[in-house]
């Protein structure tokens, strides 16, 4: 026979329930005996949940929740013996003690995953929300406990919202009982994961309640309140409410309080979700938050006695502080403000010796700021380029990706910064210093500078998509500097090979040039170069003509011949007529007309293999066709495409693609199988 007796209950906040302890200590053995009820097994208690006598129901519910508190095995046992259904019905009983004990039982049972799944199908949520309006602290505690457990499931979230549970839960955040606060906050946190709920929380004065909970004496409540604010802060509409209700001021106070170091990381996470918004950034800056953040970037504020205990925490705080800067850097409007704070120096410092997380966020910020001209120069002057180059050997993919992006932006248009390329080129050429890392780093960096990649390697892959601004200056040696497009345009006419540039001017739907949308840099470039408005019109015509073709092979053939690449650049030229094809004279005439060595490809009407292959690659990339661009000797270049042989229904080897060279010169549109004598002749004639 199992004896179920009353024991002091520990609440979920880790405190012993003083009310129960006091009553327990004052009870005499005779009093205890009057409150005990004996059942042969817990299953007997479950059966008695359907008894008509109220005193039996009270004791049966009490025995159930006390047995359930023994652990998950007990909860599953009770569920398997049918305890959940009668408990869910008894929470609506007219007797207060029965109702309370049944709700305690449901709350304790709901903490078990198996029981929680079963409760989802019992439509118990409306009854629980209804009982939360009663003035009963125990009902509040275990009712909210049950909701916090159920609200992890989407279907239960909907039920809570549909039954007007959100206003009740927000109201209970001001409860005098911390367990009720914690359970209600747990439920609200689960609900706001659906960001559509966030405006309702704000409208119900939820922000004020959450700010009040930040002053709780219980750390778990403070942490959860901050996590809830993190989620709410994601939307710009919520950030507007944050500014109006001075939420940022409260958060800055936490960051400035050394005694609240354990809350700093979660507080910074709230900031990180708001830093990319200009209005929020300015409020944070004006409130002193940016200065505080700068302090945390390098030396998180801790006392000496805390330093040893919070070493790992300090590293995490620093990482999230850098994340805040990285998020702010995603908004180009904020670059001047970050530059005023000399954020570049901070980034160079943390990238030199921070943790992997710090370096990952630091590289993200570096990559974003590297497009801002003043930051480009400052990064170089601070010695940041060699620091970032060293990060390319990291094992963390994010670090390599953002470091490469940043280096590519730094070297674009700033000749002094091309030293993250010259260093790598020199190392790659050294037998003793080169490694797989340096080769990978150079290739990764070249991915973001296709002009240099084509000059150095003589090859662009199908994934190297040609965009506006790419230029072909011919072969570039590994120890040779590649001049920028602006520098090449300023050179006087000379006898060297002309530079061919893809200089497409974006057109609006009505065919007008979009001058107003161009950046200052683009406008300056177009003053140097003749506006090449023919390419966008050509791309539009290509799309209209070629995309309707179903077969990929037909698309390649049409692009190579009909009205496009070959016809635009002088038509088919027989092999024996190559010597008389006046393409060199044509380019010289264009140079004299432009008074520079740089020629937009859209102006060329007599093009050789190198010009035709470049145009074919550009047009293919513009409409989603895949092809490579390969440089040969003596102004030759060609495109490779992959196509399947045969019919898919009849050929077993259909899944194996075959590489073809596209003839753009002699028989435009002919596909020459790679390594065939015809293809080799095309590449070498």
Image (tube, helix red, strand yellow):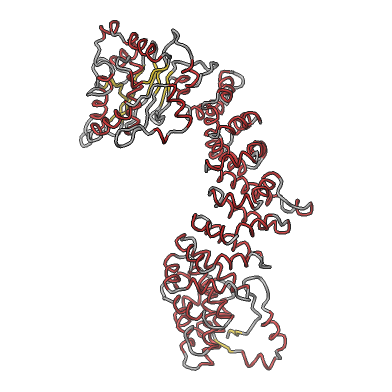
Q: Position of residue 26 (x, y in %)?
A: 72, 88
Residue found at the very far right of the displayed protein: 304
State the residue in front, 42 or 203.
203
Quarter of the image with the N terminus is bottom right
- The image shows a total of numbered marks equal to 0
Q: Is residue 303 above or below residue 506?
A: below
Q: Position of residue 87 (x, y in %)?
A: 48, 81
Q: Residue at x 60, y 60 (%)?
A: 246
Q: Is residue 669 above or below residue 147?
A: above
Q: Is residue 183 toward the left or the right of residue 194 in the image?
A: right
Q: Position of residue 280 (x, y in %)?
A: 56, 52
Q: Position of residue 595 (x, y in %)?
A: 42, 13
State the residue in front, 511 or 504.
511
Q: Is residue 508 toward the left or the right of residue 667 in the image?
A: right
State the residue in front, 634 or 370.
370
Q: Residue at x 41, y 36 (%)?
A: 517
Please tell me in which quadrant of the rendered image residue 565 appears.
top left
Quarter of the image with the C terminus is top left
State the residue in front, 108 or 598.
598
Please tell me in which quadrant of the rendered image residue 626 appears.
top left
Q: Is residue 207 toward the left or the right of residue 633 in the image?
A: right
Q: Is residue 391 above or below residue 416?
A: below
């Amino acid at each position: 026979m199992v004896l179920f007796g009353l024991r002091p209950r520990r609440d979920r906040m880790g405190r012993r329930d003083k009310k129960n302890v006091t009553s327990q200590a004052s009870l005499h053995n005779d009093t205890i005996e009057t409150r005990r009820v004996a059942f042969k097994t817990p299953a007997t208690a479950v059966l008695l949940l359907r008894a008509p006598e109220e005193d039996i129901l009270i004791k049966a519910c009490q025995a159930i929740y006390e047995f359930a508190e023994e652990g998950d095995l007990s909860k599953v046992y009770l569920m398997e013996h049918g305890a959940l259904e009668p408990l869910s019905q008894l929470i609506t009983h007219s007797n207060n003690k029965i109702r309370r004990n049944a709700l305690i039982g449901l709350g304790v049972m709901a903490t078990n995953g198996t029981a929680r799944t079963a409760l989802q199908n019992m439509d118990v949520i409306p009854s629980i929300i209804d009982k939360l309006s009663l003035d009963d602290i125990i009902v509040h505690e275990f009712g909210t406990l049950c909701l916090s457990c159920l609200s992890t499931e989407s279907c239960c979230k909907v039920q809570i919202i549909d039954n007007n549970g959100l206003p009740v839960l927000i109201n209970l955040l001001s409860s005098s009982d911390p367990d009720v606060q914690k359970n209600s906050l747990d439920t609200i946190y689960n609900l706001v994961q659906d960001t559509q709920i966030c405006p309702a929380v704000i409208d119900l004065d939820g922000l004020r309640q959450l700010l009040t909970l930040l002053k709780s004496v219980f750390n778990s409540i403070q942490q959860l309140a901050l996590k809830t604010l993190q989620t709410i802060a994601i939307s710009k509409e919520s950030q507007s409410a944050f500014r109006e209700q001075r939420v940022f001021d409260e958060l800055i106070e936490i960051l400035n309080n050394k005694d609240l170091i354990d809350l700093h990381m979660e507080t910074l996470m709230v900031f990180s979700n708001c830093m990319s918004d200009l209005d929020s950034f300015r409020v944070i800056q004006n409130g002193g938050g940016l200065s505080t953040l700068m302090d945390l970037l390098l030396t998180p504020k801790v006392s000496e006695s805390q330093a040893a205990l919070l070493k790992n925490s300090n590293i995490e705080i620093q990482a999230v502080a850098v994340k805040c800067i990285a998020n702010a850097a995603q908004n180009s409007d904020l670059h001047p403000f970050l530059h005023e704070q000399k954020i570049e120096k901070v980034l160079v410092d943390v990238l030199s010796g921070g943790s992997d997380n710090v370096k990952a966020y630091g590289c993200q910020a570096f990559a974003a700021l590297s497009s801002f001209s003043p930051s480009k120069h400052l990064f170089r002057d601070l010695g940041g380029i060699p620091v970032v180059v060293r990060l390319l050997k990291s094992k963390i993919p994010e670090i390599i990706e953002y470091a490469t992006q940043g280096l590519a932006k730094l070297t674009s248009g700033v000749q002094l910064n091309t030293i993250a390329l010259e260093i790598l080129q020199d190392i790659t050429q050294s037998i003793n210093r080169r490694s797989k890392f340096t080769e990978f780093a150079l290739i990764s960096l070249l991915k973001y500078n296709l002009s240099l990649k084509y000059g150095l390697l003589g090859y662009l892959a199908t994934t190297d998509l040609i965009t506006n601004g790419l230029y072909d200056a011919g072969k570039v040696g590994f120890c040779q500097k590649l001049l920028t497009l602006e520098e090449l345009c300023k050179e006087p006419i000379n006898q060297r090979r002309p530079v061919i540039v893809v200089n497409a001017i974006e057109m609006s739907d009505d065919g007008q040039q979009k001058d107003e949308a161009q950046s200052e840099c683009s406008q300056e470039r177009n003053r140097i170069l003749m506006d090449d408005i023919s390419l966008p019109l050509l791309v539009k015509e290509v799309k209209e003509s070629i995309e309707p073709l179903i077969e990929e092979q037909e698309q390649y053939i049409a692009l190579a011949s009909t009205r496009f690449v070959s016809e635009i650049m002088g038509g088919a030229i027989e092999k024996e007529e190559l010597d008389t094809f006046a393409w060199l004279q044509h380019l010289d005439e264009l140079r004299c007309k432009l008074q520079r060595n740089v020629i937009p490809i859209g102006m060329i009407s007599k093009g050789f293999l190198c010009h035709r292959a470049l145009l074919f690659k550009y047009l293919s990339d513009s409409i989603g066709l895949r092809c490579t661009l390969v440089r040969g000797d003596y102004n030759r270049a060609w495109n490779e495409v992959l196509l399947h042989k045969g019919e898919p229904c009849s050929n077993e080897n259909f899944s194996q693609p075959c590489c073809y060279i596209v003839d753009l010169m002699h028989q435009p549109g002919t596909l020459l199988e790679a390594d065939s004598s015809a293809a080799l002749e095309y590449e070498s004639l």
